[in-house]
Image (tube, rainbow, N blue to C red):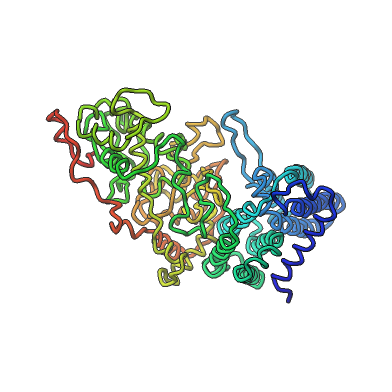
Amino acid sequence: MTTLLQRLASLAIISLMAVGCTQQSMRFPHAPHTEAIFKTYSSKLLALDSSMSDWIRSIQQLEHSASFSDSMHCRFEIARRAYKRLEWIVEATSPGSAKQLNGAALDEAEETDQKIISPSGLQVVEAIIFPKADVADAEKLIDELKRIQSATRRMRIMLDGIAFTDAILFDAMRQELFRIITLGISGYDSPIAQRSVSEAAEALRGVEEGLGFLATDLSSKQPTQFRALSEKLTAAIQYVECSQASFNDFDRAEFITRYINPLCEALYDMQTAADIAFVDYRRPLSTRAKTLFDVDAFVLKGYAPFYVPNSTPDLVQLGKLLFHDPILSENNQRACASCHQPEKAFQDGRPRAVALGKDNAVLRNTPTLINAALQPSSSYDQSTVYLEDRVEKVLQSPSEMHSSLKLVAEKLMKSDGYIALFQKAFPVKQAGISTTEPITPEQVKQAIGAYVRTLVSLNSRFDKYMRGDTAQISAEEKHGFNLFMGKAKCGTCHFMPLFNGTVPPTYIGMEAEVIGVPKEPKWTNAEIDPDTGKQAVTHMELHRYAFKTTTVRNAELTAPYMHNGVYKTLDDVMRFYNMGGGKGIGIDLPNQTLPFDSLALSQSEIRALISFVKTLTDTTLTDTTGLTVTPTTLPSFNLEAWQRRKIGGAY
């Protein structure tokens, strides 16, 4: 069998020959691989373009053939494998083109213009021809293949002129490895055909081809590290290619812990040993993360607005006091901690939060604040983005705090203790803020935001298992993880490792889903909950009953569940999904984004899933880091009534 090193060396020689044969080889002297990469992938895109033309001709020839469906499936498999070889470079250089080539088969909204954007790409083709291709859909299929052709041509243009530095190539390969284990093997982009396992091998082959452009330099300069990287990449490819497991039976836990994580670490070691810089992108997932499960894999400032000051102990301590101080509310009785109670994983254990005052407003279920800083949307309906936005909105809400940042700042200035704390936390006047006041409204929300950003904890048994401590989870829990990421399709919405709707591998955007949550826990002839969710914000019908996908982490501690708290137990939640969401319990919901066919999970599989979810309960919630410790005193005020306020507030 040809070794990986031999294959990579061959690829490198071919690439260098291509560079030597072109008159444009010096266009990018600072990125020596650029011309070779452009020629290689331009050729591959041209081949994909040509295959679409061949596919269209075959449709026209086979429209009346009994083998039409089988032929379409065969063509699809060839096209998808070809794309997967390209995926690492297409996603890195032109995410927009990648979306047009292989985007999810769901309508999207352009909220600014109130327009619906129809999906395109191979996932749309998959939805047309699987499980069985119908000749009646021939014209629709041809139209989609032509759109894919247009995308490949745009992509070829995009490639021309990009300088492929070593840093960019390493980052693209790392991102592809993360994409394989989060979106690839979960079935995210092959939800019907379920070809994800075999396609993972093609994606790894794409990484192998990418490494080939660097092989000569790396193997000569750092032979030990390159050999280790080569061996691990070969092992990962062989594990997938030799697997006889079906989509449902593939051992994802084994694949990630024994092959991909070590491969990611070897890629990191190779890059550092070769003294290749890391790309300097500001994004939530650190460009220096060895694996997705590193303790410091995520950069908190990636989800923070540009204007927030750097976090300091003084700023965090001030935010913690404010969070637990009912002075923030109009009646001086409700604090942030009234609903987000530290001892209850920073939620309240109620189906819905209790409204302040007498307006009888119907609020939503109080979400946990653990890891709330690791998401690009801070509310169920995605009406707010940053934590600071959410603080401001809650303070202004008549049903929650019935106050405002301005009123809170004015109240706080009546306390010498708070004035001193703000001066310590904000020693330098912030740019763009002109005021002589010792406390500003902006500082109030920034301090609370800084505190909430410390409520990050990614140290559960699952995390420790992924970091190499295989004794952390049982066989049943491991089975539950494989179900979560496979047959049960949980991982296609609750993306690993955050297990919320923040989309990997960049973790920048966040999905909202229409799953059909009922008004009451009925299993037949159910009625949809009247809360229209995101639709009330965007006023678009596509978003009716859409809510952001919340985290599964610490779900063991955060019952009841859903935005309305309709389900009391995880068993109820699993039953809902197993039946196909709202449609499965009798709700007529045309825009449901959750697959509405039954998952056919057995009771033992449901038990395994719940067992896995419980491995996401973070050990730090037992107070090993002081995460849930509350203040013992609050700053003093001269007003006697304010002096009697309760730490943590009350309902």
Furthest residue toward bottom: 1
The N terminus: image quadrant: bottom right
* 229 and 149: which is toward the camera: 229
Give the total of numbered labels: 0
Above-or-below relation of 377 to 5: above
Q: In the image, 48: left or right of 237?
A: right
Above-or-below relation of 221 to 328: below
Furthest residue toward left: 640
Q: In the image, 40: left or right of 264?
A: right
Q: Position of residue 363 (x, y in %)?
A: 35, 36
Q: Position of residue 8 (x, y in %)?
A: 72, 66
The C terminus: image quadrant: top left
Q: Position of residue 269 (x, y in %)?
A: 55, 63
Q: In the image, 412: left or right of 250?
A: left
Q: Position of residue 267 (x, y in %)?
A: 58, 62
* 583 and 146: which is toward the camera: 146
Let me know if residue 345 appears in the view: yes
* 613 and 93: which is toward the camera: 93
Above-or-below relation of 70 to 154: below
Furthest residue toward right: 61
- Quarter of the image where one finds residue 575: bottom left
The residue depicted at 78 percent of the width and 63 percent of the height is 13
Let me know if residue 533 appears in the view: no
